[in-house]
Amino acid sequence: MPLRTFLVEDDEHIRTVLSELMRTVADISIIGHATTEISAMTWLVSEPNEWDLAVIDLMLASGSGLRVLSGCRVRQHRQKMVVLTNHATKEMRRRCADLGADAVFDKATETEQLLEYCTDLRRRA
């Protein structure tokens, strides 16, 4: 069964490419997306039984992925939140973990690891 995944990414090109990769490589079902902090938190919090995985960029059209993480800390144990960012420094990884991220991946160098993470999650689900 595919993981129901919600993308929080404001760049349409990245969102399209990522969606296609996740569908074809990791058998992920993209159920929706948000481009702003408010729209992401609103959907994730109001639909607590509709998603298994949220993939979050830190820099959004409006607001921050850090606030999305913080606002969604209370969630079901099976629900995972991962960060995919161009700003995956050691300090930012620690900060994301402190806010509840289950994993952090660098957009430029760790997309394959993200797909492996998603595949592992799906297998365990």
Image (cartoon, rainbow, N blue to C red):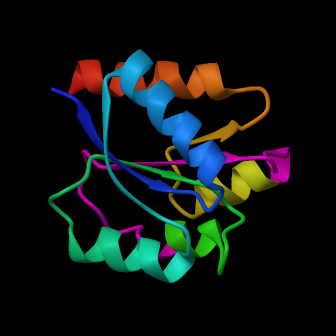
Q: In this image, 119 relative to 56: left or right?
A: left
Q: Position of residue 113 (x, y in %)?
A: 60, 22
Q: In this view, does 98 lie above or below 26?
A: below
Residue at figure coordinates x 23%, y 57% from the top left:
76
Q: In this image, 53 relative to 64: left or right?
A: left
Q: Where is residue 69 in the image (x, y as percent from the top left)?
A: 52, 66
Q: Is residue 89 above or below residue 20?
A: below
Q: Where is residue 32 in the image (x, y as percent from the top left)?
A: 34, 56
Residue at figure coordinates x 49%, y 18% from the top left:
116
Residue 5 among those drawn in magenta: no
Q: Quadrant of residue 123?
A: top left
Q: In this view, does 5 lie above or below 1?
A: below
Residue 88 among those drawn in magenta: yes
Q: Where is residue 41 in the image (x, y as percent from the top left)?
A: 42, 76
Which quadrant: the C terminus? Answer: top left
Number of on-image labels: 0
Image: magenta residue range: 70-91
Residue at figure coordinates x 15%, y 60% from the top left:
49
Q: In this image, 95 relative to 38: left or right?
A: right
Residue at figure coordinates x 54%, y 36% from the top left:
18
Which quadrant: the N terminus? Answer: top left
Q: In which quarter of the image is residue 99?
A: bottom right
